[in-house]
Image (tube, rainbow, N blue to C red):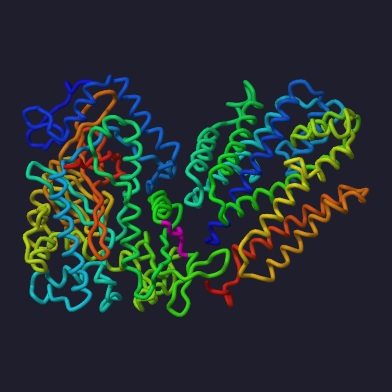
Amino acid sequence: MDFSKYELDERIYDEMFHSDGTARAQYQGVHAAVTGTSAAGLGDIQDQVTGSFSSEGISFKVYGDEEGDERIIPVDCLPRVLSAGEWQELEAGLTQRLKALNLFLADVYGPARIVEDGVIPVDVVRGCPQYRIEMRGFQAPHGVWVAICGTDLVRTTEGFKVLEDNLRVPSGVAYMLANRKAVKASFRRLYRASRVQEIEHYGQVLRTTLEELSPAGTSDPTIVLLTPGVYNSAFYEHMFLASQIGAELVEGRDLLVDDGVVYMRTTAGLRRVDVVYRRIDDDFLDPVVFREDSLLGVPGIMHACKQGNVTLANAPGTGVADDKSVYAYVPDMIRYYLAEEPIIANVETNLCRNPDGLEYTLDNLANLVVKRVGESGGYGMLIGPHATPAERAEYAEQVRADPADFISQPVLALSRAPCLIDGHIEPRHVDLRPFVLHGRQTRIVPGAFCRVALRRGSLVVNSSQGGGGKDLWVLEN
Amino acid sequence: MLSRSAEGLYWMGRYLERAQHLSRLLRLQTEALVDRPVNEIHFGWLRMYGCLHRQPPVGSLELLAQDDYTLADSYTLADDLTFEPTNPDSVWSGISNGRENARHVRHCLSAGMWTCLNRTYLRVQGMTIQDIWASSPERFYADTVADIDTFAGVAAATMYRDEGWRFLNLGRAIERVQLSSALLHAQIVAAERTRDVSEAPWTGLLRLYHALEAYHRTYGLAVEPRRVLDLLATDARLPDSLARTLDTLSAELAGTAASPNDQAAGAAQRLMGRMSALVNYAWLDQDDPKALLQQLNERGRDLHDLLTESFFNYPVHDVPVR
């Protein structure tokens, strides 16, 4: 199959090709494999990859879509490839960033030096709906508030940038592993010849991380994964991870708290729980402390957590550090806590809470991406260049009504990678979400959930908005 | 094991057993549509609806003198029992509920079990009675039976023999006791209500439980109702007999970890013993198998309640902590 229809655009970084049309070193193997395979052969490979997802029932749920309550994330069979050198730099940058974010959380729920020293305005922190006043004074085990982080990275012609830190309940790691399994089985020879770094031990690394954070004095901790249930969009992943790490998959109704200790209900009676890998939002965690109408949570679990009888990973209240306004200050945090320069840059961000930022945003709406501070998953955002004047005008009204709820960023020319689309190889925009684990030390398996905007020209990679996935290969040195 | 997971496995077992049993019955019935006399077809529907304690969607099942059971009626009845989503006993309900429970407890299943069950679900999903009726409905039922048999085989070959395995088998066995006792009961009632029925429905019953050859070997070629009932109830060598199913139930129950609810668990053990005695001892002296089957069915329901109280939904006060 050839690349005759493959378009290069010098304003957009292409993952496979240099601007002169020659394949990058790390992509030589994939390039040769694609060139040496017929269109029908690649079609078969694609069908095989898609088929394995369907029969294994690897699905997610789309909100607001009554019919398709279970959908398969479309997967493109062609892997995205990073060199060992590229990965090492990302690894260092991600480690640095999570270290600073954990220090920030300990600080804002403790002495708040960073606010006192004027690095971050007090209202940005306190005004954030994700700031949990209940967590003030809490000492996270070993200072680790965020044990599992999924950072969204994009690449432009200027290099990698962090688009978003997901510090609450990041998802997608099951797809990282499922994509690898399916693609590896379909490109057997290419995979072996390429010497790709392994990611299959993610479950062990996660288990080790959670064990390291168990309450003092527990030698063989009982770990559970707390899910909102089968109707949650990421339920497949919860189930998958629970079996990977040898944890019971529990719902709120399976747990109860007695005298500050958490128990689960088993067929043989109650059993004490030491670590809860919770995949349920702060709001729904404990009806006694947060939303009292929550049926998903466990009454009293916050009390048990604050007493140190159970570890919640991630700790409640971490949302303040991945808030879209606070995001703008992460480079300053790195400088403040670590006295280092950020290794991976931020995307330039205008805070509409500041008069300058608001004015700039409203004046340049047609060229910006505007996001609601509290939303995620690609919901509630405006992509200026793709919106109609009427949509922009309507959105501007919303921004004016509550400026603090919005930020804007330039429309990024996300890098593109080759995908098999309707029997041709075409470029599509991609991002990547590596998973950073932090117990006593930081560990990152060399892989990521790579998301693809499968619609031509689209920049939106979210699974809920028509995005798909790709396997990401990090090559050995 | 987590109580909710155990309960999910238990129900998964029950639903799949139900779908399997009904598919077997429908296979037999749709085969009969080809060449059996009308009164036998009528008998078949009567037996099926009687076993499910369900009212047919087309009103009364009485066979009037001038009324021929047309294919159209069978079509409606088969649809009601196969694809009707509001019928909790339909084949589709069994498969989709079984799969829904499996989805909740997927981490307790082997990968092969899930894939097998999910394929079955994907095959049946979206099908309608029109899709299967024109060519060969019995083929559809045969495939469904084979799918669920395969699932059981994959489970036996791949599932870790922990508590989950026990609860899956408890669900299957208790459902089988309920279905078999109800079907045998319905068979007797239908036989009482219909006249001039040949031995064919009794032969059919033997085929349904894979027992025809065993019957011929034991009793010869003449098929007599009472002997059929005896074989299906008491022959422990027959995989689907009541006696064997109760043995399985009893063994799985004895193998579960100590329940936190001593009282309910003790009552369940005693009830189990009484159910076994009904089949293994009382049956031989009993002239009225109908009453005995009814009794067995009611005790099966009580056993389900006691299992729920023992392992799934026990009171948490004063419960031992492990």
Query: Splitting the image into 4 quarters, where does residue A294 fall?
Result: bottom left
Q: Which residues are magenta?
A: A246-252
Q: Can you say whether B301 is above or below B234 in the image?
A: below
Figure label count: 0
Write the residue at 57% across / 74% down: B320
- Left or right position of B127 against A41: right
> Does residue A224 sit above or below A218 in this rendering?
above
**In the image, residue B88 lies at what x, y percent?**
64, 46
| Quadrant of residue A245 within the rendered picture | bottom left
Q: Is residue B84 left or right of residue B30?
A: left
Does A227 appear above or below A135? above
A50 is higher (above) or lower (below) than A241: above
**Residue B195 left/right relative to A466:** right
Q: Can see residue B178?
A: no
Query: Going 39% across and 65% down the picture, which residue do you hit?
Result: A276
Q: Is residue B151 visible?
A: yes
**Residue A90 falls within the magenta-colored stretch:** no
| Residue A4 point in image, percent of width and height | 16, 21
Relative depth, front residue between B310 and A125: B310
Camera-nearest residue between A390 and B7: B7
Residue A144 appears at what percent x and percent y?
25, 68
